[in-house]
Image (cartoon, rainbow, N blue to C red):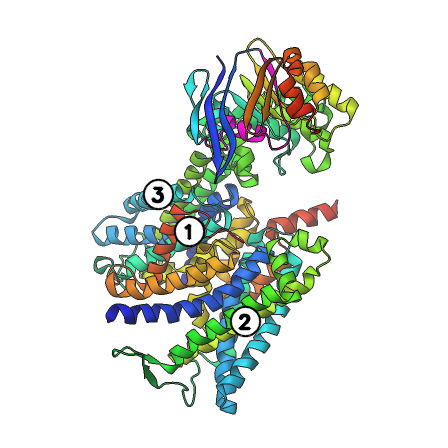
Amino acid sequence: MLLNVSKVTVQFGGVTAVADLSLEIGRGELIGIIGPNGAGKTTLMRVITGMVRPTSGRVFLKGTDITGWTIDQRVRSGLALAQQIVKPLATFTLAENVALACGSRRMGSPWRAMTTLDRKAELEQAKALLELVGIGAAAHDYPSEVPLGYLKCLELARALALEPDLILLDEPLAGLNQAEAAEMADRIAALVTDARSIILIEHNLREVVRICPRLFVQDHGRNLDFGPTQQVMANPKVRAAYLGGGAD
Amino acid sequence: MAYEIILLTTMAIMVLFALSLNVITGFCGQVSLGHAAFYGIGAYTGAMLTKAGWPLLAALLPAAGLAGLIGFLVGLMSLRVRHDFLAITTMGIAFLFVGFVRKQEWLGGEIGISGIPAFAFGRVGLLVVAVVCTGLFAAVTIYLKRSWMGFGFDSISDDEDTARILGIDVPRFKLWAFVIGTAGAGVAGALYAHHVRYIGPDSFGFVESVTVLAMVIIGGIGSIWAVALAAAVLSALPLWFQFVDDYKLLIYGLLVFAVMRFSPNGIAGALQSLKRRAR
Amino acid sequence: MLALDLLLQGIVQGAIYALIALGLTLIYGLLRILHVAHAALFTLGGYIGVIVTNQTGSLAFALVVSMVLVGVLGILIYRVAYKPLLGKSPLVALIASIGLFIAFEEGFRIVFGSYGLSFEDPPLRTQVDLGGGLLISHSRLLIVGMAVVILSILAWLSTRTRTGIAWKATVTDPQIASSFGINIERVRYLNFFIGSALAAAAGVMVVLLTNLVEPTMGAVASYKALAIIVLGGLGSVRGTLVAALAIGIVESFGTVYIGHILDRDALAFAFLVVALMVRPQGLFKAD
């Protein structure tokens, strides 16, 4: 088991954002998390990344309890995150943005970081990753000089640079037109390997249904259904709460 | 000649002091309004040890060590607060230091410590030691900036939340910046104590903290050469302005203001835009 | 009795801190600038108060003149010093502000002399009995009374008048406010005017207590007011008031009970550091 979210509940003040959620993911999976706005998708993601501490319940990564870990600890042990709102390091070129991620797992110890001068290998690796996501030509530009679509690809390249076992993608298709979205979705689907899984949180139902073999549906902080895509989409409860509810 | 030696020693010590803050504020982006406390810790440690018979050169190490150790503790506290809250917390710590020293009989209390022994190799000897220490520290920071740690510092200074998402161990990197920076300030303080040979709580107050921060920012955050230049010039300014004695602080204040107002990126920023214009 | 007396002293000191810090918090709330030079306006307020009282014999008139003149100077400082720096890193404005503060302090020394000024005929020195032998001077009573009156007027203005509501909205969220057609620039002027006038009032009051205004009078205020607004949650008016009172009271008790370990200023900061460790965002969330 790669990721195991076990009976997680999150409360903010008196509001329950996520209620008693469990989720298990093995290696080589591509899972779509869908649900209307306010369903608790983002909170669930934040519980997995460590930005939000659950009120109760536990999170395991590769069998290790990571519930109390900080986000950078999780990242160094195999988790990667591409955020909906792109956050490039503004004073770094795109290549440097990726190179930092390439090296960060090995540079977890400050002593190692202090005694390592060479960044060439990481920069080469970064350029290769930028080529892979289709923006190699902009490797030496600064984030302020490239369009938003490039920055979305940069997020993806940075996530890959961490050589993760599990990638969390938060609305990677938002803001893209239909053709761009389809292209990005194909790119995402191609990133799944035997060893690596992806969790895709996305509003673009057409693309999610097209590329994800399994779906996890959330509504009002609860899990409505979790299973093979066709089966989930046929579930009347899901249709009522989500599709029939007029959202998206 | 004696005057020039004193001036140069002052400049060398201030450059070391400013470069030490540059590691914390310039490299790692953590604003400190209380750096003079670590200068003070180094000064008191150095002075107490040489008064107890230690040679100055041997006293530098414990001065750096104690300042770095307390810097580590303050760094731990600083992990909890950010930005303006951090600036004010560090300011508070500096006041705690001064307030504590003021009430300690064994540290001279309000009166401070006088009769600090002169350096065995004279004024010129002290100048040489100050220049060597400053040079070494500058070399360390140049190395640090080029290393992966410097790369990590850059990312933290840019946006620490993003740095975390990219797997940078932000707390530990910050702690290292604090330890290196405060240890450097400790050495500068010990040298200062033997340069002026009298120290008191007022030598390490808010004004001193602000002055050294002004040097870093006027130089241009993070740029080693520009910070060193700014520290050298600003520490000598009040002496050069002796002829307008009554107005020297007024001019100093207005100058600090004017640099920020007209060249917000400091000397380094001004040079860069000049270069760009020349192209 | 000692405890009550200390509490009273703490409240008087807290009231003064509140007046100084309130302007600072308003300015921070709107512009995210730590306005250190604010303390220079506090000192200047004291100078104008003493000089005008000595010339005219009227403390009330002096207070008004001081508040208006210093308020206008506050606007000038915003126009000349801060407005061009708004897009830059907040550090730049902070250092510029510190430079300005140093220049002001020196300016006072050169213009008014190093030894400070006093009232020729110190007003309100008489004492009243609050009952049970608890004595308080008229000047202290006036300080607390004035602080309450000024803060009540502000509270009333900000909730009942159009300008006041616009002002509050802008401090809370400048972007939304401007989308509602509020002239942000005017609100900023108002902010600097009111904040600086409050600092001037505090300056006059401190001089009433000590009967001495010196060039360096603002030094303590400059950093302690920063500590107070940070403790109050940076930008929270309510938090600032509570923090001001808290620091005033902690100081007056602490000086007596643990004054032999730490001096007065360090006490306030020990309290600040401990409080921030427990609540890293200050006592109150910015409102």
- Callout 3 environment at 10 Å: few (<14), some (14 to 19), or many (20+)? some
Residue beneath label 2, please?
C153
Q: Is residue B110 above or below residue C177?
A: below
Viewport quadrant of the C terminus of chain B: top right
The reply to whether dot 1 and dot 3 touch (C-beta < 8 Å) is no
Depth order, front residue of C221/C141: C141
Sequence-first disc among 1 and 3: 3
Picture disc at residue B73:
3
Give the magenta-colored segment's residue range: A28-54
**At label 1, which amino acid type do we have?**
Thr
Q: Horizontal placement of A192 versus B115: left or right?
A: right
Residue beneath label 1, please?
B90
Q: Chain of mark 2?
A: C
Badge 3 element: helix
Q: Is residue C21 above or below residue A91?
A: below
**At label 2, which amino acid type do we have?**
Ile
Mark 1 vs mark 3, CA separation in Å: 12 Å
Badge 2 element: helix
